[in-house]
């Protein structure tokens, strides 16, 4: 992309797709050099994305040939951007020497990610060829609990002494920059391993050369603990907008740093998990939709479906208790879906807002009463509007008796109020007992409202229409 | 927070809450100096969060007094982190001179955000006191389309000439650093206003002083167009993980830069919009859940509810066409919710996965056939398992006739297959015609599956049980 013509994102995406197709057809004709040259017009992230598509469409062999033809420094970057599956496929197809080269050159945190994905025998082979010091560090990093700050951090940071002058610090940064994830935030110690402060490269560049690092460093920095969960890590980045956050152990010794670019993926992952749970899909989605097998898909979806089959059967049993009412006024069957559906929908709306509010920290458990009061008032407004709408439709358009209209209208207000309060309160209650609020979305809410709505409707009918059960 | 004891996030949050309560009780006793001193142990982000809570609980007067007692540089930072509503409340309570000071010191992009929120008369007052050059620039920025890259960018970046040496560039950066949003990526021009390349401070710090900027700069940089939508901006940041991305106009002139910290909020906003739409809540959620009025809440929720009331009534009418079947075999009414609910749930699961896949670019429109094939196979697996489960429950536990069991089982397979394929295809179809796929979640899917499931079930019943309609 050396052109200077400006393109908006759509045009760029189109260009990307066209070039990808060209590369694929070069590969099909085994015109590898042409393919490589076109590929190299893109940056590492784009190249990784293209290789991923090529691997899927043309198989691993062509990708490996192409991968080997990339300049060595590019291939290391590209490798670290590939998804885990593709990394494994490539590692299994290249020589030990090539693997060692890539591993040696990769950033430490990317290396840990790759090692976590690779089969044990390849990990052993790689560790054998790793210098003893680094091997120890790798093993330590691989042992942090899954999804903890420890597995996200990198030990490749710039560490300064508080007694250095700015000029000394800058000279030191110049020397160490190659082996650091970031040089823009530097970490200051005082002899030992304890973190004393942080100083930005910006502050160092602005300051006079003979100032001391200890005068420039900030001591009220934000830090994470090595055992903090990745969700808390993401929260900290979202809240403060920092480039990097230091990670310390329980003795406040600096053990690594986490940079913002690694956190973007975590935020996306956490959101996906939330959204899927809200949509009734359980289990880990460690693979992309299309890469996940049919049985894994089925296994992730069945738990909620089986749970709901049971609750829907209970709903059915409850409805059949009102056989007397239904057989006398069979038209009520036609309005049953309306009441059940409205209960589910209004409840889902409230639950969605509260779950999202909890997850972005807009509301917390102290707001329970406020949420109750808000949903109470909203449900009165909505309940009344829907009731009037339905009453008019039933009497004027369906030409049913006003009593049928009244039955639906009265039941509607009760159902909407019940559903909104349930939807508002259930996520909070879940959080209180340590259950993920996202589980209290559509499936759970509609399970409960289906049962309750149908009973409310049929009870209202039997009372208003004077039918003894 | 000058302590060196390590705390994990939970402990930190607890500490925060305790200190906030202390500050509130100081304020209630009008012990403002105590409140301020405790407040100043936190950084600007935390202080803003505390002021937000204090404003809500104790009213704007106390917050303004406290705000005025903050050191001036802190107050500017804190102000820019406050939500729009609170900024307006504070601006209306402080003097013109104080406003001018804050406005003068704020980062340009934050200033634009604030001006967009403020009432017109205050904006006019502020602009009057702004130097002419800057006023022109502000007006230009305020005129970019809402949610475009133009409204997110800042003109405060470091601009180098390609003919500079590294030493000259570093000296220039030292001079300009105070007025720049970031110094870590610098933008290189060649005489005119066109963007020729970008160079990182890291590269400049590593390089020898007499090298030329033109030798260090990268020319295959990623850039955005000033009219790109904020969703595309967020995509670019997620994809590349860059600190900052330059924004150019249609003549490829550099007009501003966007930094990653401003994009975190956008990503969160876009996700919230998606989640709310998936949960059947329409409209803008420019306010937090608790701050939004009851009628605004009702207005955001009513469109889908009214739409669904209509579709549920149609479902009811369809069901009443099968009065003959239902009155002959009234037990079928008990299984109707089961079929309708299962249709809605299985469809929602598929739709959730496809909508999320589309929004994180895991799948695109070219994958339509693959999604169809995947959902087809998943639905066969799930359909068969649910059918067997239901058949056994109906015959063995409910003691119904095998024909009733068979009716439910056969209808179940058809309903699951229909719902899964609908859930998989509808979001793709929506995207094809330019509609937000997130609108094809629960509300839309269950509207359609409710209708179709009940018809499938009652048709199956009339055929298998030999009832003429």
Image (cartoon, coloured by chain):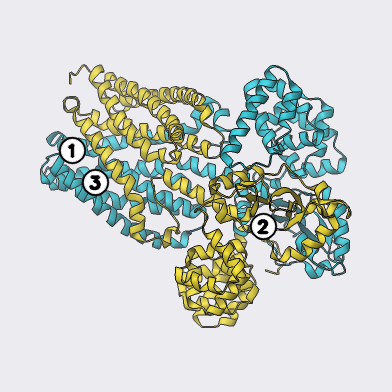
Chain colours: A cyan, B yellow
Res B402 visible: yes
Whether discs 2 and 1 lie on one chain: the answer is yes
Give the crowd class for mark 3: few <14, some 14-19, many >=20 residues within 10 Å.
some
Whether discs 3 and 1 lie on one chain: the answer is yes
Callout 3: residue from which chain?
A: A
User: Where does the image place residue B326, in percent across and percent down from the top left?
Assistant: 19, 27
Looking at the image, tell me whether mark 2 or mark 1 is earlier in sequence order. 2
Q: Which mark is residue A332?
A: 1
Asked if the residues shown at circle 2 and circle 1 are in contact, with their CB atoms under 8 angstroms apart, the answer is no
Residue A43 sits above or below residue A373 on the image: above
Question: Residue at point 71% right, 30% down?
Answer: A39
Give the crowd class for mark 1: few <14, some 14-19, many >=20 residues within 10 Å.
many
User: Where does the image place residue B118, in percent across and percent down from the top left?
Assistant: 48, 67
Dividing the picture into quadrants, the one containing residue B426 is top left
Whether discs 2 and 3 lie on one chain: the answer is yes
- The image quadrant where one finds the N terminus of chain B is bottom right
Give the crowd class for mark 2: few <14, some 14-19, many >=20 residues within 10 Å.
some
Q: Is residue A325 left or right of residue A352?
A: left
Callout 1: residue from which chain?
A: A
Looking at the image, tell me whether mark 3 or mark 1 is earlier in sequence order. 1
- Residue on which the image places disc 3: A456
Asked if the residues shown at circle 3 and circle 1 are in contact, with their CB atoms under 8 angstroms apart, the answer is no
Mark 2 and mark 3: Cα distance apart in space = 52 Å
User: Where does the image place residue B79, in percent across and percent down from the top left?
Assistant: 57, 69
Looking at the image, which is closer to me, B153 or A68? B153
Asked if the residues shown at circle 2 and circle 3 are in contact, with their CB atoms under 8 angstroms apart, the answer is no
User: Where does the image place residue A345, in percent across and percent down from the top left?
Assistant: 34, 44
Residue A65 sits above or below residue A421 on the image: above
Dividing the picture into quadrants, the one containing residue A265 is top right
Mark 2 and mark 1: Cα distance apart in space = 60 Å
Mark 3 and mark 1: Cα distance apart in space = 13 Å
Eye-nearest disc, 2 or 1: 2
């Amino acid at each position: 992309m050396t052109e200077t013509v400006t393109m908006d994102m759509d045009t760029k995406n189109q260009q990307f797709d066209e070039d990808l197709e060209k590369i694929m057809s070069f590969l099909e004709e085994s015109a590898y050099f042409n393919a490589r040259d076109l590929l190299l017009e893109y940056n590492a992230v784009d190249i990784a994305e293209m290789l991923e598509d090529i691997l899927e469409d043309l198989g691993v062999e062509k990708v490996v040939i192409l991968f080997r033809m990339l300049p060595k420094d590019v291939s290391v970057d590209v490798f670290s951007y590939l998804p885990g599956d593709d990394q494994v496929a490539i590692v299994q197809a290249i020589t030990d020497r090539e693997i060692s080269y890539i591993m040696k050159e990769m950033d430490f945190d990317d290396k840990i990610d790759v090692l976590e994905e690779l089969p044990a025998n390849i990990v052993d082979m790689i560790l054998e060829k790793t210098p003893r010091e680094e091997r120890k560090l790798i093993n330590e990093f691989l042992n942090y609990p899954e999804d903890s700050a420890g597995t996200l951090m990198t030990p490749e940071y710039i560490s300064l002494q508080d007694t250095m002058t700015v000029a000394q610090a800058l000279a030191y940064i110049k020397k160490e920059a190659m082996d650091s994830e970031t040089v823009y935030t530097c970490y200051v110690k005082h002899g030992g391993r304890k973190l004393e402060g942080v100083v930005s490269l910006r502050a160092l560049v602005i300051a006079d050369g003979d100032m001391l690092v200890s005068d420039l460093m900030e001591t009220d920095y934000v830090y994470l603990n090595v055992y903090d969960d990745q969700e808390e890590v993401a929260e900290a980045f979202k809240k403060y907008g920092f480039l990097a956050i230091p990670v310390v152990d329980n003795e406040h010794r600096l053990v690594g740093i986490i940079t913002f670019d690694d956190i973007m993926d975590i935020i996306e992952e956490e959101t996906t998990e939330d959204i899927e749970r809200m949509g009734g899909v359980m289990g880990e989605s460690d693979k992309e939709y299309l890469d996940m097998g049919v049985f894994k898909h089925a296994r992730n979806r069945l738990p909620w479906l089986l749970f709901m089959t049971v609750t829907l059967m209970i709903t059915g049993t409850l409805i059949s208790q009102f056989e007397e009412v239904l057989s006398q006024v069979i038209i009520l069957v036609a309005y049953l879906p309306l009441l059940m559906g409205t209960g589910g929908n209004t409840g889902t709306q409230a639950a969605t807002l509260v779950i999202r509010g909890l997850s972005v920290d807009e509301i917390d458990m102290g707001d329970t009463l406020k949420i109750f009061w808000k949903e109470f008032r909203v449900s009165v407004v909505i309940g009344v509007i829907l009731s009037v709408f339905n009453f008019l439709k039933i009497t004027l358009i369906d030409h049913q008796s006003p009593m049928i209209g009244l039955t639906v209208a009265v039941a509607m207000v009760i159902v909407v109020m019940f559903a909104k309060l349930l939807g508002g309160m259930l996520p909070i209650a879940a959080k209180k007992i340590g259950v993920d609020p996202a589980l209290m979305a559509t499936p759970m809410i509609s399970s409960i409202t289906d049962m309750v709505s149908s009973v409310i409707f049929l009870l209202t009918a039997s009372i208003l229409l004077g039918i003894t059960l």
